Each structure stands twice: as structure tokens, then as C-alpha cells.
Image (spheres, helix red, strand yellow):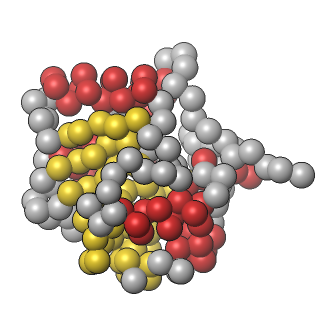
Amino acid sequence: MTVTPHKFKADGDFVSRLDRPERRRAIPPSDIIQRMNVSKRDVLLDLGAGIGYFSIPLSAKVRTVVAIDSEPKMLEVLEQRAARRRRDNIRTLVGEALSLPVPDGSVDRVFLAFVYHELALPALVLEECSRVLGPRGRLTVVEFQKWDTPFGPPVEDRKLPEHVEKRAKKRFWMEAHYSEAVYYQLEFRRL
């Protein structure tokens, strides 16, 4: 039996579903970004960037954000939001996680927020993340806890932090693990 992962669709009122006050309270971008310890020199790839929930605040902290998503409608919203905030260091690209449209070693950081549970082949995606990272590159994975929360995918579609770490250990070593009520955050360094 093949299990198809839960995938967030850009339909209906997807913007308000992704960016509502209760979500911002439970998942404040500033807390996640602070733990990442990013630099103004960093080129960061936001994989599954969506409407820019993280890309826009990250753009204030890094040199460039490469925002990649498979849903063009999401990237259109991101571009409009970035323009309103005069964020000209965000580059959007339509792309798939298994073949990122960026050269080898071209980014300093890869950021996956609430995307891992949607991946059909997570180990291969993590290898692709390693490919695009430079030699001292870092990977951040933020995911929903594997218990019932006020929003997020069905619990059975969620992955434990140990699942992510096991799939990542071929290319990365884990530097930090943060756990909150709704989400966890894993910080990795490329081997």
C-alpha cells in the first residue's frame, strides 16, 4: 500500500489559513529565526516558502532569500507582500523539492518549515538540500508536533523529530532540537 503524504493546496482562502492570528501566536517567526542564528551574509533557500510567512521576516536578517514553492499562486502572494514591505532581496522560483532549481553549493542555509510531512521521499529531498548547500551549510527543519494541535495536518501524517534526524544523518549532524507546544525545530550542519 502506498501512502500519499498530506499536501497543503493553494485553494479557497489559503492565505487566511496560513496567516491567521492564532497561528502567529503559536508559531512566531521571530522565535524560530532567532534560534537559527542567521547572518547578513547568508543566502537562504526557503523550501516550500508559501506566502512568505518566514521568507519575509528572514529577508530582514539575511543577504538573499531564494523562496521556492511548487504552487505559483502562493509565490504570487509572497511577491505582493514582499513588494508592499519593500523587500527586494527575495527571489521566487517555482520548483520541486527533489530537483531544486539552484546550482550546487550556492546557498548557505536551507529552511524547511512545515514541509517535511508533505514529502513522499524525505531522505532524497534532504540529499538535494545537501547538494545546494555550501561546505559549511546549515539546514533548519520546523515541523508540527506529532500530537493534536489547533491546526496542522492530520496527526497520522506528522513525523517525529527522530524520523527527521534518522533521514538526515547521512548528510547532516544535528546541532540543536527545540520543542514547543505546536511545533519542533531542528538545526543541522552539513557533514
Q: Quadrant of residue 32?
A: bottom left
Q: Quick one: quadrant of the C terminus?
A: bottom left
**Image position of 178 with respect to 111: above or below:** below
Q: Residue furthest front?
A: 103
- Residue 184 visible from this viewpoint: no
Residue 76 spot, x, y in % from top left: 34, 23
**Image position of 131 with respect to 121: above or below:** below
Pick whichever, 164 or 42, lies toward us.
42
- Residue 55 visible from this viewpoint: yes
Residue 94 spot, x, y in % from top left: 40, 35
Could you tell whether 114 is left or right of 135 in the image? right
**Image position of 142 with respect to 167: above or below:** above
Question: What's the residue at 11%, 62% (across, down)?
Answer: 41
Pick whichever, 58 or 102, lies toward us.
102
Question: What's the residue at 30%, 30% (across, down)?
Answer: 78
Could you tell whether 42 is left or right of 113 in the image? left
Pick whichever, 163 or 171, lies toward us.
171
Question: What's the residue at 27%, 77% (across, down)?
Answer: 136
Count of marks overlaid on the render: 0
Residue 131 spot, x, y in % from top left: 40, 66
Pick whichever, 22 or 143, lies toward us.
143
Residue 38 spot, x, y in % from top left: 20, 64
Q: Residue furthest right?
A: 1
